[in-house]
Image (spheres, helix red, strand yellow):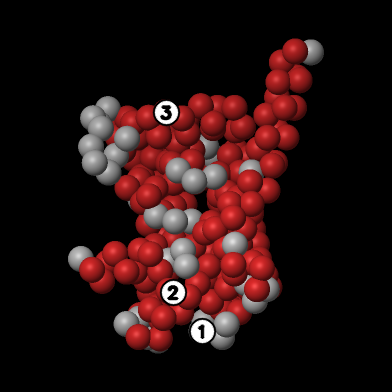
């Protein structure tokens, strides 16, 4: 239990993650863990509590410190993100109605599902891209797309584009900014700022949607 708690804390703290990779999770174990977390957050409905943007940014900082191969980790996590969304999409196609009827539990909240459904109805297929940068919505968006019957080829295009953009932007932001002392001193605030900037397209689209409704 102590090890799991330490791993959790390390995922969003560069110094802790560097220490973890240098002691417990050396070599390929580190890459397997990071792949699994990104896949679970985007592909399994119970993965919404995993860190997403903050984890990728932290990974970029760690790669900038020379503890991870930046090119390989970007490729690996992009595959994880795309595969995760594909899994969520297929899950929605095959078991959607039954999942909607499930009662709340410790790891499943119907409210998250309903909010994502409203988000999808408002933004359509672009939700798959937008959702990459929105916690919780990111986990449920591909599932809702599967339930809604989105054409598979269209979903794949949005999924690949969004997965690449999300992983590359977040990891490289950490890679290039993580070595700046001011960034490291205010790491949590920086991560929050990145998340706010990343959701700007959603805000712009929302304002356009309201303007169209008024017209």
Mark 1 residue crowding within 10 angstroms, few (<14) / some (14–19) / many (20+): some
Alpha carbon distance from label 3 to label 1: 40 Å
Asked if the residue under mark 3 is in contact with the one under mark 2, i.e. CB atoms within 8 Å, the reply is: no
Q: CA distance from mark 2 to mark 3?
A: 34 Å
Residue in the foreground of this view, choosing between 202 and 54: 54
Percent x, y of residue 22: 40, 86
User: Please, which residue is most extreme toward the top here?
Assistant: 214
Q: What's the residue at 40%, 33% (across, down)?
A: 113
**Labels 2 and 1 touching (C-beta < 8 A):** yes
Q: Position of residue 195 (x, y in %)?
A: 60, 50
Q: Earlier in the sequence, mark 2 or mark 1?
A: 2
Image location of residue 143, percent across then percent down: 42, 41
**Picture quadrant of residue 140:** top left
Dot 2: what SS? helix
For the C terminus, the image quarter is top right
Q: Which residue is mark 2?
A: 17
Q: Which residue in the structure is indicated by mark 3? A: 114
Query: Which residue in the protein does label 1 denote?
Result: 67
For label 2, count other residues whose C-alpha is less than 10 Å away and answer few (under 14), some (14-19) or many (20+): many
């Amino acid at each position: 239990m102590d090890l799991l708690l330490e791993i959790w804390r390390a995922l969003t703290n560069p110094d802790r993650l560097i220490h973890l990779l240098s002691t417990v999770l050396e070599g390929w174990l580190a890459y397997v863990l990071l792949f699994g977390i990104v896949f679970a957050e985007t592909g399994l409905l119970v993965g919404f509590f995993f860190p997403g943007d903050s984890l990728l940014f932290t990974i970029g900082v760690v790669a900038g410190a020379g503890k991870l191969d930046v090119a390989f980790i970007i490729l690996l996590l992009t595959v994880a993100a795309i595969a995760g969304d594909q899994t969520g999409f297929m899950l929605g196609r095959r078991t959607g109605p039954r999942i909607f009827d499930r009662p709340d539990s410790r790891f499943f909240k119907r409210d998250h599902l309903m909010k994502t459904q409203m988000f999808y109805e408002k933004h359509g297929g672009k939700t798959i891209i937008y959702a990459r940068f929105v916690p919780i919505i990111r986990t449920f968006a591909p599932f809702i797309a599967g339930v809604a019957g989105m054409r598979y080829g269209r979903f794949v295009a949005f999924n690949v584009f969004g997965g690449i953009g999300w992983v590359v932007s977040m990891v490289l932001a950490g890679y290039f900014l993580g070595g700046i002392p001011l960034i490291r001193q205010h790491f949590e605030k920086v991560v929050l700022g990145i998340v706010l900037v990343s959701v700007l397209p959603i805000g712009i689209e929302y304002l356009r949607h309201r303007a169209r409704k008024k017209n």
